[in-house]
Amino acid sequence: MQKSFPTSNEAETAPARGRGRPRAFDREAALGQAMQLFWHRGFAATSIADLIAVMGIGSPSLYAAFGSKEGLYAEALRHYGERYDAKAWANFMAATTAREAVAALLMDSAAALTGSCGRVEPLGCMVTLSAAGSEGHAELGELVRTARAHGLKRVEERLRRAVAEGEFGAAVDVQALARFVLTVQNGMSLQARDGASREELEAVAELTMSGWDAQVGRRTGSAVSKREP
Amino acid sequence: MQKSFPTSNEAETAPARGRGRPRAFDREAALGQAMQLFWHRGFAATSIADLIAVMGIGSPSLYAAFGSKEGLYAEALRHYGERYDAKAWANFMAATTAREAVAALLMDSAAALTGSCGRVEPLGCMVTLSAAGSEGHAELGELVRTARAHGLKRVEERLRRAVAEGEFGAAVDVQALARFVLTVQNGMSLQARDGASREELEAVAELTMSGWDAQVGRRTGSAVSKREP
DNA sequence: CAGTTTATGTAATGATCGATGCAGAAATCG
DNA sequence: CGATTTCTGCATCGATCATTACATAAACTG
């Protein structure tokens, strides 16, 4: 099985000015608008008419630049990953212990998913909440499914590294612990979509780390480190 | 704001034979088929043509019996609540302690959401995963949002009762604990949709109860009671 | 039986769906 | 400059969308 639309862009990465008439709109800006609409309404419920309205372009321009509705969604997913998903994992990556990494992931998720960064973006994670696969678009479904699996893999590998480094014993069930963390993060997206506040999700993160401590050995102090205002 | 389609049925509850030509199909059976399709594909991605195909009826019969696509979805939600949701909460309701109740809810959810009861139904919870609200149907969105809020309320009230009965001290943050449990259960639906097994979700339930114990005081033995094969 | 009432099947409604044909506009190239 | 290439706006494509007339069928009522 090979995909028929570009995950990484194909021709538009050409940096220098092309030959014909130049594009009259900012491709990334328009993609950002499309991403937000897909993010909020989902793939099936978003029409081309809706898209060209928020993107401020005509449909021929849309198809010339992105190929198809599926292609646009695939690019919107990539755009999301670069702009938002990466940010939610930054502190996870930078943490020195697995526990700090997971705690940072959950606390940063609590903030990001509830739009607490002065954003106007939709609530919850676009990848987590995407149902494009169930809506009958197998290719897009595989795309988001892979992205979600990647998150689990990242946590799992971080925990394996922690075992190798002696942060906790090999008796800890790394896969179960990783899935537990991801399940909570997934649930946070649904909670955020229903209006849960950052503080409420941070409390969930704290309780999650209590479960962590009960499993791998408790530390002193609060379950998670305090955040900057 | 008042709803324009029936949550509880209106005329079809009449038990005795009516006056005109009798309906040629089993209303509940057809509703069950519609429910499964909505459950799997969501509201927006399910067309009337798809529905009448699986229901085995013509579109005039559908509209005569259910009023509209939204009305059919609302009834499908009710049908789901009666047939599946109630079952997932039975042991929760019957438990003698709040801890047993929550553990039962999570363990039963792990089984129900992964289709481990010999079912052919879609994976995950129809109510939890419904995005009808975001898809532009405010009335249906309010319906599923209310159903989801009801789950949180049930757990919260059970915990309050536990405090009143002295199962654990009043220092426990009942709201946070309830939201923690519901967040995990919500996450389980997304995990199940992505193919997580019953055993994997049961491990998540175990870890969740570890977090519980860390918060309200630990008990001996396994975090959750064993299930029957 | 005729009359009423409700359901069904066929076929069609206007609207909207995703996607394009086409002519002109705006750039580069020779 | 003309030739070529690419993009844009307008109009439109056939398909599908949710919904409904309409005629007929099947029950009950009197």
Image: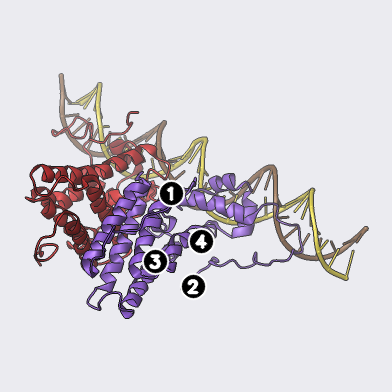
Chain colours: A purple, B red, C yellow, D brown
The local secondary structure at tag 4 comes to: helix
Q: Earlier in the sequence, mark 4 or mark 1?
A: 4
User: Callout 1: helix, strand or loop?
Assistant: loop
Label 2 vs label 1, nearer the camera:
1
Q: Which residue is mark 1?
A: A229
Mark 1 against mark 3, which lies toward the viewer? 1
Question: Looking at the image, is A209 positioned above or below residue C7?
Answer: below
Residue for badge 3: A151
Where, by quadrant of the figure, is residue B194 drawn? Answer: bottom left
The amino acid on which the numbered mark 3 sits, given as a three-letter code, is Gly
Q: Residue at x 16, y 32 (%)?
A: B14
Q: Nearer the viewer, residue B139 or A121?
A: A121
* Residue A83 locus on image (x, y percent): 52, 58
Q: Chain of mark 3?
A: A
Q: How far is mark 2 from mark 1, CA to CA?
A: 46 Å
Between disc 4 and disc 1, the foreground one is 1
- Amino acid at the residue labelled 2: Gln
Q: Which mark is residue A74?
A: 4
Residue indicated by mark 2? A2
Residue B55 visible: no
**Disc on the earlier residue, 4 or 3:** 4
Q: Nearer the viewer, residue B104 or A218?
A: A218
